[in-house]
């Protein structure tokens, strides 16, 4: 929930869909109220069925996650120059 506090957002949010107090999709919805999609991209992970994520700044990945696929999603979603992978 730190992303919803005042200040600059992180470069990217990597979250499981199944969280103890609210779902990853609910977290995405709350974050979208505070930050525009281009400023805060999301990658949601789940071993279950894929949630509906309709944004060029959000994606879903099934677990177990392939590291190369995850890095490709981070590079695709994160603004160029803001995130260094590796």
Image (tube, helix red, strand yellow):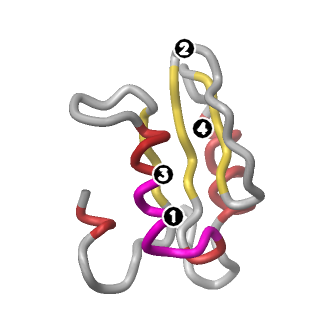
Decide which of tag 1 and tag 2 comes sooner along the chain.
1
Question: Which residue is under mark 4?
Answer: 67
User: At x 25% / y 57%, what residue is drawn?
Assistant: 1
Which element carries disc 2, helix, strand or loop? loop
* Mark 4 or mark 3, whichever is nearer to me: 3
| Contact check, label 3 and label 2, Cβ < 8 Å | no
Circle 3: is it few (<14), some (14-19), or many (20+) Cα within 10 Å? many
User: Which quadrant holds residue 57?
Assistant: bottom right
User: Which quadrant holds residue 50?
Assistant: top right
Residue 28 shows which numbered tag? Answer: 3
| Contact check, label 3 and label 1, Cβ < 8 Å | yes
Please tell me whether residue 34 belongs to the stretch shown in magenta: yes
User: At x 73% / y 54%, what residue is drawn?
Assistant: 55
Circle 1: is it few (<14), some (14-19), or many (20+) Cα within 10 Å? some
Q: CA distance from mark 4 to mark 2?
A: 19 Å
Decide which of tag 4 and tag 1 comes sooner along the chain.
1
Q: CA distance from mark 1 to mark 2?
A: 23 Å
Up-down: is 81 above or below 3? Answer: below
Residue 26 placement (x, y as % from top left): 43, 43
Residue 32 shows which numbered tag? Answer: 1
Please tell me whether residue 22 belongs to the stretch shown in magenta: no
């Amino acid at each position: 929930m730190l992303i919803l506090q005042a200040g600059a957002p992180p470069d990217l949010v990597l979250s499981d869909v199944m969280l103890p107090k609210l779902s990853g999709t609910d977290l995405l919805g709350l974050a979208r109220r505070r930050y525009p999609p281009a400023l805060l991209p999301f990658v949601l992970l789940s071993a279950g069925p894929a949630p509906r994520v309709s944004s060029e700044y959000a994606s879903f990945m099934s677990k177990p996650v392939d590291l190369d696929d995850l890095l490709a999603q981070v590079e695709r979603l994160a603004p160029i120059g803001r995130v260094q992978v590796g």
